[in-house]
Image (cartoon, helix red, strand yellow):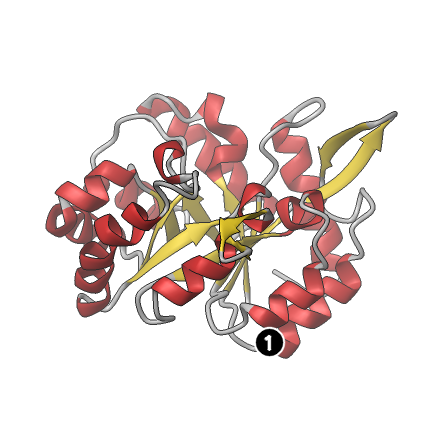
């Protein structure tokens, strides 16, 4: 498994070509060898690939606008071919599909694009938050359970986010076992507390038992990329990424 950085962590610093170049150079200097593209400003895929190639960074996953995946599927696939990226993701369930009344439309809208993506040798990836683990009146099933019923592992993978499973009150290791056929990419993000408030933290600086979580990921034997993400950072997001990298490198992950 290769260790990567989720660029959403540094989204404020990747909105122009100049800033993208500088930020990616900083990330490569930390030791990361892969990145996920999310929250980035407008940049041609050819140029982004060129910058990453110069820094020996591989683009392994994106979060792509859900309407583009539905309406511009072939163009999205072509752009990912330019990027050298096999995983085409969305950052979560678009809001209109989150009710029991409207959920069925998600599979109706995304099934065909997911098949086209699979036929191109790539994989549509769904990133979880906490709300997918709430039972929502669909046969008393959780949304995450419906998702894996509605899409085969060849049609949809799960970008498994450790923080959000913990925030949902779920057992991270249990869900890794349940979803193991789909977890090609994992978002590593820790959780700490400030009074009664939950806070995100660098990996192994909070309360998630990452030694056991990483053992479970290793046992599942299907994950290619461990991607560090911290949506909200106290202080510099660059420092947070470096701290997470250092802690994981001590365990042998690079």
User: Residue 208 location in percent, x, y?
Assistant: 78, 51
- Is residue 47 visible in the rendered structure shown here? no
Quadrant into which the C terminus falls: bottom right
Quadrant into which the N terminus falls: bottom right
Which residue is found at the position 76% from the left and 58% from the top? 210
Left or right of 82? Residue 240 is right
User: Residue 22 location in percent, x, y?
Assistant: 44, 29
- The front one of 243 and 134 is 134
Left or right of 110? Residue 161 is right
User: Residue 28 location in percent, x, y?
Assistant: 51, 45
User: Residue 121 location in percent, x, y?
Assistant: 23, 69
Which residue is found at the position 34% from the left and 21% from the top? 16
**Which residue position holds label 1?**
220
| Res 67 → quadrant | top left
Left or right of 96? Residue 223 is right
Does residue 17 lie above or below 149 as drawn? above
Does residue 27 lie above or below 182 as drawn? above
SS under mark 1: helix
- The front one of 37 and 95 is 95
| Res 70 → quadrant | top left
- Is residue 149 visible in the rendered structure shown here? yes
| Res 85 → quadrant | bottom left
């Amino acid at each position: 498994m290769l260790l990567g950085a989720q660029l959403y962590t540094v989204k404020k610093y990747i909105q122009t070509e100049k800033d993208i170049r500088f930020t990616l150079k900083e990330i490569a200097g930390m030791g990361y060898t892969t990145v996920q593209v999310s929250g980035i400003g407008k940049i041609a895929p050819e140029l982004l690939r060129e910058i990453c190639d110069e820094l020996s960074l591989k683009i392994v996953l994106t979060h792509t606008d859900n309407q583009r995946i539905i309406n511009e599927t072939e163009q999205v696939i072509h752009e990912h071919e330019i990027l050298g990226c096999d995983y085409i993701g969305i950052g979560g369930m678009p809001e209109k599909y989150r009710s029991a009344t409207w959920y069925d439309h998600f599979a109706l809208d995304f099934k065909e694009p997911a098949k086209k993506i699979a036929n191109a040798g790539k994989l549509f990836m769904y990133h979880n938050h906490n709300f997918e683990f709430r039972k929502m009146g669909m046969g008393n099933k959780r949304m995450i359970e419906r998702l894996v019923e509605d899409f085969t592992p060849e049609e949809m993978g799960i970008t498994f986010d450790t923080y959000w499973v913990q925030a949902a009150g779920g057992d991270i290791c249990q869900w890794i076992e349940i979803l193991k056929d789909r977890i090609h990419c994992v978002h590593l993000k820790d959780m700490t507390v400030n009074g009664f408030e939950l806070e995100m933290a660098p990996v192994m600086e909070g309360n998630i038992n990452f030694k056991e979580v990483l053992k479970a990921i290793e046992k599942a034997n299907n994950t290619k990329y461990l991607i560090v993400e911290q949506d909200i950072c106290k202080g510099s997001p660059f420092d947070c990424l470096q701290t997470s990298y250092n802690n994981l490198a001590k365990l042998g992950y690079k």
